[in-house]
């Protein structure tokens, strides 16, 4: 800084010896016209004075940070311990999740037998109620497929049939919600028990395993609404609102395009995997769980195809109108044409696969309860009893002349009969040894070990 000086007006760097600033043309050492002053309160500290003399002709100009006044910042006193703090309350669902996670972390496994039996009962009632609802709706569905008019199809039912359908529909809806809640909790707790009962790590965490079923229902409902509502609005003659609704549906779908089929694959893969990992020797593989996974995927895909039928019909009708045709090829007015038959086949297939997958969940739920009970028994007694005598094989297992028994040296292992380490071969020609021969000091063949 001995060969340059800084202008106090424009902060330009000038050579030492030049009398004026090359930027603003002010003289060397002149005071700026507008100097920012600090507001001084009653307790504000005074600015520090420059340690250099005011005579600038005696030497080079001082550095800018020495020439400008500096004010000390006020010291902030630390907050007191008893001062009120701002509290951030967590989300209720997140707080409940943390509480449940802390409770489960202290338990290796929890009892889920009662919840499993309740879930199986609710699913059975749901299947029966759904079948009765479909049977009572069959006339209206047949009329709807023929004429594609929902109001007239509902009016084709009598007053008694309409009341029955409404009652069954309300009951099935309540059963579906309660069954979904119980099944989700049961699957979440079963996933938590898997590692505690000696099984491999499941594909999903307990929280995700319980939440993926509600997420699948919610995703399927959004897809159905996004496909059906815009098409129905356009069918009613409101073209602009229908197009706006279609754009909104496409925008929402685009925001979730990162994982478009995760809602379907997560439950379809997790349940068969969990069912197999909780199995024991001889019952690990399960064709029922694999068949359920296939039927679950097919039912959801058929539901999406049927939800897209109004949009497809609107596209076909628009194309026929632009082509100048009054009738659509394959559609028969007032009867069952090829198009009506195809739609009926899709609806019947959806009902069959949906009821089949829902009915298969009942034995799968009971199987999960039974497998957990078996594994809990193995965990409880597996370290304290000898498994040489296997269940169902009698008092002794088949043993050879020198059976490798890892529990042979454990004196406390006396719950069941032990298989003898050495089996005496009986010779009919010699017969049983006499007491004198046995006690004459000769070698005696080792006999079976005593029973505890």
Image (spheres, rainbow, N blue to C red):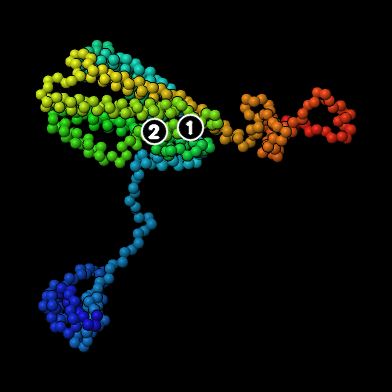
Instruction: Report the side of 274 relative to 156 (left or right).
Output: right
Q: Nearer the viewer, residue 234 or 83?
A: 234
Q: What quarter of the picture does the C terminus occupy?
A: top right
Instruction: Report the side of 226 relative to 217 (left or right).
Output: left
Marker count (numbered):
2
Q: Which residue is mark 2?
A: 267
Residue 22 place in picture, x, y as percent: 13, 77
When the figure is inspected, residue 7 is found, relative to residue 429, above or below; the finding is: below
Which label number is shown at residue 231?
A: none
Decide if residue 379 is in sight here.
Answer: yes
Q: Which residue is mark 1?
A: 276
Residue 283 place in picture, x, y as percent: 52, 28
Report which quarter residue 7 is drawn in: bottom left
In the image, what residue occupies the spot 17% across and 15% down? 333
Instruction: Report the side of 28 relative to 105 (left or right).
Output: left
Report which quarter residue 82 is drawn in: bottom left
Residue 222 place in picture, x, y as percent: 27, 32
Report which quarter residue 9 is drawn in: bottom left
Counting residues from the start of the chain, the first of labels 1 and 2 encountered is 2
Q: What quarter of the picture does the N terminus occupy?
A: bottom left
Instruction: Report the side of 421 relative to 80 (left or right).
Output: right
Crowd class of label 1 (few under 14; some 14 to 19; many from 20; radius 10 Å): some
């Amino acid at each position: 800084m001995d060969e340059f000086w800084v202008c106090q007006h424009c902060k330009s760097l000038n050579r030492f010896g030049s009398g004026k600033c090359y930027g603003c043309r002010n003289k060397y050492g002149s005071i700026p016209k507008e100097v920012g002053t600090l507001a001084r309160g009653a307790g504000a500290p005074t600015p520090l004075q420059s340690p250099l003399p005011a005579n600038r002709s005696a030497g080079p100009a001082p550095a800018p940070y020495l020439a400008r006044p500096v004010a000390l910042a006020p010291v902030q006193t630390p907050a007191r311990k008893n001062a009120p703090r701002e509290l951030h309350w967590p989300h209720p669902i997140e707080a409940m999740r943390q509480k449940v996670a802390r409770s489960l972390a202290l338990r290796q496994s929890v009892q889920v037998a009662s919840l499993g039996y309740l879930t199986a009962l609710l699913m059975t009632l749901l299947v029966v109620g759904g079948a009765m609802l479909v049977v009572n709706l069959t006339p209206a569905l047949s009329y709807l497929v023929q004429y594609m008019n929902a109001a007239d199809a509902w009016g084709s039912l009598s007053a008694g049939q309409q009341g029955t359908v409404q009652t069954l529909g309300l009951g099935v809806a309540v059963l579906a919600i309660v069954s979904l809640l119980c099944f989700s909790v049961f699957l979440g707790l079963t996933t938590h028990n898997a590692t505690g009962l000696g099984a491999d790590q499941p594909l999903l965490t307990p929280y995700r395993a319980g939440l993926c079923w509600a997420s699948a229902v919610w995703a399927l409902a959004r897809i159905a609404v996004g496909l059906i509502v815009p098409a129905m609005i356009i069918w009613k003659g409101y073209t602009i609102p229908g197009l706006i609704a279609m754009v909104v549906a496409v925008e929402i779908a685009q925001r979730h395009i990162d994982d478009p089929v995760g809602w379907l694959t997560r439950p379809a893969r997790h349940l068969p995997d969990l069912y197999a990992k909780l199995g024991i020797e001889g019952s690990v593989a399960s064709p029922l769980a694999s068949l359920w996974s296939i039927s679950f995927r097919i039912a959801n895909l058929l539901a999406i195809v049927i939800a897209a039928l109004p949009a497809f019909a609107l596209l076909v009708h628009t194309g026929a109108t632009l082509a100048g045709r009054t009738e659509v090829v394959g559609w028969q007015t007032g009867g069952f044409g090829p198009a009506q038959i195809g739609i009926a086949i899709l609806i019947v297939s959806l009902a069959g696969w949906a009821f089949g997958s829902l009915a298969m969940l009942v034995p799968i739920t009971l199987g999960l309860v039974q497998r957990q009970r078996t594994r809990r028994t193995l965990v409880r007694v597996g370290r304290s009893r000898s498994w040489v005598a296997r269940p169902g094989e009698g008092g002794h297992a088949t043993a050879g002349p020198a059976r490798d028994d890892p529990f042979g040296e454990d004196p406390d292992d006396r719950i069941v009969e032990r298989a003898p380490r050495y089996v005496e071969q009986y010779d009919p020609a010699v017969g049983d040894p006499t007491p004198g021969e046995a006690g004459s000091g000769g070698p005696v063949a080792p006999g079976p070990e005593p029973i505890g």
